[in-house]
Every structure is written in structure tokens, then in C-alpha cells.
Amino acid sequence: MSEMRYGYVGKIARINLTTSTVEMISTFDYVPEYIGGRLVCNKIFWDNVKPGTGALDPENMLIYMTGATTATGIPTGGRSVFTGISPNSFPEQYVWSGMGGWLGAELKFAGFDGFIIEGKAEKHTYIYIEDGKVELLPADDLWGLMVHPTQKKLEEKHGKDVKSMVIGPAGENLMRNATVTTSNDSVAAKGGFGAVFGSKNLKAITVRGHGVVRPYDIDKLFELRMKMANPTMRPCPVVREATHGMDGNMIPVEGGWLRGQVACSHGCNQHCNRLMMDMKSAFSDERINQVEKCVGIFAYGYQEDCSWSPIQNFETERNHFLPCKMLSMENPPPDFEDPYAPELFKQVRGDIVNFWKPDFDKGSVMMDMCNQYGIDKWDVIVWFMTWLSMCKQEGLLEDMDFGMEVDVENEEFVKYFLDMITYRKGKYGPIFAEGMARAIRTLGKEKFGDSIYHGRYSQMINKPLDLPVSLETAWGHSFHWQGRGFEGSIYKAGWVAHSLELMTSTRDIMTIAHFHDDYENFLKYRDDPYHSRELVDAVIFNENKAELKDSVTTCEWQSPDIYWPDMEAQMYEAATGIPTTQEDLDFASERSRLIFRAILIRNFGRTREMEVNAVFPALTIPDTFGEVATWEEWNDLVDLYYEVKDWDKETGWPTREVYEKYGLKYIADELEALGKLPQ
């Protein structure tokens, strides 16, 4: 159990809060067959969590795992992953949520590759891990604190060098959008796992470690550090910006604002996150610092949705950049001698949506409240606030008394609303604390979900376009890279591919699996993506790379690199010393997705009918060019996807032959006994 091997440190702690016991499990019960990260999580969940378990039940397991590259210094390897049954997805299903920050590395320094949380503590509790030991400690003095004060209090108790993941009041009050937050305000957001912490009476996990994590090949590690991230992504100086926002949301900031760039996790050489300094606080007169991701830009102003250019999805070897082009259009500069350059860099302007005018201070306050309460910013910005704005403009809220006039451009209303849903106050606080998908159905979906907002205008075809007042897409999440409402200007082939990825998921897939492909492939299916084997192959490629991001680990800023397909294999071999090819990792990725698929089938009744009906309604909303998908087109694409995967088209279930090909006979046997294996 104490044996250390390259990349891994050898132990997983299984922590039962009900019995206050800790069992030590060998990591090598799972690796290298299951690699690490999300793949190990999937295997543990399949083996331990029975059908019928709810997200907030004590039997729900929260499984946290690092990867072989975590803490080795390999770029982007500091990331880690949570999995469990999500209270945020609709309906509740098994979900994963990635996390940056320094805790994953610190956990390995403390001698653990991961931990499992199950049961429910009798009293408010936090977990303290140090150098191979796990303690369950009382958290009465932490309960009720916001995120940053909780982190500070834990440092006062245990020293400034500890690393913590904590929940805020949103998690304590079982808000379904609640996050788990660690350093740099890196969060596990999409699963709503903050509410699972709260349901288990768990406030925080604090870690200190003095051990080491040994990568196998130091020379290869240095080579990767120089090659990965296109090493133009270097630490940049603090600068004063005169404006904030992009495109139609650009706003001058009185006196300017200070910006730096920081990495989200240990050992990373990519500085993707904005460090915003001297910002307005929601809770005091003191100025604060914030670390914000891309969606934060829309908290400050949302008159126009996100613009787009083909290079965000489709690339050539001469113009091959990071997945989000906002920080890399000038560094490195585009190669305009590329014959495809004019089309690659053609900007498609976002739709005019007129949700709220730019207001720098109000946006800062909104972000601060999300950080401190522990709420998923995506849901607040792209769903709660847009819904309030559209419903108000369409006169749908006239019979609803919130206790204050609804006005998303009013800083005081933003504070009032977020406080109301976090603490479940009044008549509507408990309703919205259940998340927008459930709230809309409680209020009445026909009126509060399907009513048309008349304020959307396409700048590409110069005409108004219908848009529902709810930006709901599938599985209880809002639009993201699907050509409508947010990043609405994406081309048809892009939103079709993203929607297919979403179909087999349980959450917003786009934070880990943006769609990337070669531009010449794009030309083959640009006009008819519904009948293209090339598009389906590219979707599967991106799905498998997404598994590796949370298993090796890496991140969306670096992977996939379609012109460096064995990058992850090089990372894994450098960390572990295990000879690894890209084909080996592709095999492991398919195994991971099959276990995930089997969990959805066994535990949550997933079928083809459920999937196509979950995703299709959003595809009937016109994109920025006025295009929609027909039922026949969508089902033709689903047929082709299942055919390539060798899954049964009628049920959407993998066959026994597929499971056994990937060493999962035990799963096929159990599903057959349950009548959930196609003949």
C-alpha cells in the first residue's frame, strides 16, 4: 500500500461520514488499466452505487480523482475531477465536474491519488488530510460562512500552506446550482456538487502534504513544458485596461481596471484566467481581486451574444491555435498565406439580444456574489439573469411579487435575487434554488419556458429571430456553443456536432469537449452535416479526448491538438514510465465512455428515445442564419452515430460484443440480467 510508482502515489481514501470510518484502497486496484481520473471514478461508481440512489441521498458517492500527470509539473496536469449523481442535471443523473486549483497536487503530496465521500455526517463536519492521515473534524464554526472566509478560517486553523475545497451558503442550503470551490476560485460547478456536500453535512476538505510525486522522465517533462501551450502563453505583466467586454458589449471603465493572467492549477505554464484587481465587492467597501473565466465577460454587459469565427472549431496546420481564440488571435499572429485564412478568420457577429447594458460595477458585484455564495456562474449569467430579463421585457412577471422590482440592470436587485435564492427566502427563493429547469416547470413551462422573446436580432441576415425566454437546451442546462442564445453565431456544422456530443451526456459538455476538426473535413460536411461519416468520426474523436482530459489529466486549452494526436500519450508515459501509444489511450477512452454509458442505462434508464427528445427541441430554434434541424435530419445523424459506435439503433444501447471488445464482460452480464442489453 505504501509503494510509490511513477505518476501515482498509491492510495485512495474511502471516507464514510455516517460511520466516521476511513478505508484505504490501493490505486493499483484500478490503474494502469483504468488510467486515472474520470475513468477510475466511473469504475468505482459502477461497482458501488445502486440504481434508485438520489443525488442528495447519503448513498450517493462523491468520487474525486487526480490523474497520473497531476503534481508532476507536466503542463495542465494539475487538474482533477469529481463525479457523482448530480442534483443540478434534469433529471438527476451521474455527472462529472472538472476542477483546477492546487488541491489535486496537494492531495498527491499528502499520499493520496483520490478520495471517495459517502454517507452523511451527524453534525457539521470538515475533513482534514495530512501526509497519509484522514481526520473528520467539527465544522460548526465554519457553517454559515461564505467561501473566502471559510478558506481563510481553515488557514488560521491549520496554517497558510494548506489547500482547501469548500462550499458556501448555497451548498449548505442545498441549492442545486451550488459549487465546490478551491484556490483561484476554481470550481467544480456543473454537477451542483456543492449541494451534495451540504446534504452530507460536509463543509470543506483541507489538505497538506509534504511528499513528492515522481515523474518517470524529467527530460521529457521539460520538453513538454516547452512545446505545450504554444509557449507564447507566458506570464504576462499586470496591465491597466481602459475598456472591458467584447464586440457590442464593450464598455469604457472609469479609471481603468488592472488585469493579469494566471494559471488555474499546479505546474501549468498556461495563463488562461483573468486576474481582475481592485474590483467592487458585494459585501464591503474594500476593493477585491477576482479570477474570472470567459463567461464572466457577459456579467458586465450582454447586449450582443458571443461572436464567432470558423477557426474556433476548424483548423489547419498553418493556423492551429488554442480552442478559445480570444487570447490568441494576435499571439501567434495568423498566417494569412494559408489559402484558407480568409474563411478561417471571417468573423460571424453575434445576435443582438439586449439582455442588459454594460455596467462594470454591477458585473463585478454579480461575480463576487457567485464566488462567495458558491453558485455556478454559468447558470446565473446565461440562464437566471437572461430569463429574468426576457420575461420582464415580455411582461410575463407582472403577476409575480419578488418583493422588489425585477431589474437585472440594477445592482441592488442582482444582490437581492442572488441572496433570495441562496437562502431560499420568500415565496420564490425555494423555487429558484431548485435550478432554472425545475423552477420553470414549477411556474409553468408553457408560459415561462416557451414564450417568445422578441428582442433577438440577427446581424448576419438582418432580421428578428424567435427565441424562447428560457435558454434551456438539455439535461437541465443552458445553451453553450450550440448556435442559439449564447455564442449564437456558430455555423450549422458546429452546432450540430456540439448537440450530438450533448446527446450522450448528462450535463453541459462544452466546458470539456468543444468540437475541433480539420478545416478540409469541415468543407466536406459544411452543407449537410447530418449524413457525414467525417463529422461523426470527429465527434467520437473529441468525445474520447474529453475522457482523457479528465483522466490523464489535461485541459480544454491544450487538448485536443488535432495535429499532435499522441500528445496525451507522451504526457502519460512521461509521468508513469508505462509505454503508451495513442491507440492505447483511445482504447481506454472508449472503455471509459462505455462504463459511463452503462451507468446511465442501468441506474437512470437512458435510451435513444430519451436522448433524441432531450436535445431536439432546442434545434428547432433558428440559429443566427435562420437555420433549424428537422426531426428526420436529427434522427438520421443519430442513426449514423450509433451505427459507427456499433450500438443498437432502436435502444441506443451498446451490444455485448462492444462491451466484451473493451474488457467489460462483467458489465454486459449485469445489463443482460436486467434486460438492458440488446439482442
Image (cartoon, rainbow, N blue to C red):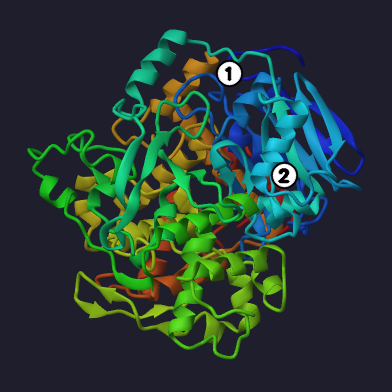
| Mark 1, other Cα within 10 Å: few <14 / some 14–19 / many ≥20 | many
Q: Amino acid at mark 1?
A: Gly
Residue 7's disc number: 1
- Looking at marks 1 and 2 on the same chain, the residue that comes earlier in the sequence is marked by 1
Q: Is residue 275 above or below residue 113?
A: below
Q: In which quadrant will I find the N terminus?
A: top right
Q: Measured from the top left, where is residue 412 in percent x and y?
A: 55, 68
* The image quarter in which residue 445 lies: bottom right
Helix or strand or loop: what does disc 1 sit on?
loop
Q: Is residue 12 left or right of residue 373?
A: right
Circle 2 sits on which residue?
Answer: 62
Q: Measured from the top left, where is residue 357 in percent x and y?
A: 36, 68
Question: In the rendered image, is residue 480 in sight?
Answer: no
Outermost residue on the bottom side: it is 399
Q: Nearer the viewer, residue 662 or 72?
A: 72
Q: Is residue 574 left or right of residue 679?
A: left
Q: In which quadrant will I find the C terminus?
A: bottom right
* The image quarter in which residue 560 lies: top left
Q: How many marks?
A: 2
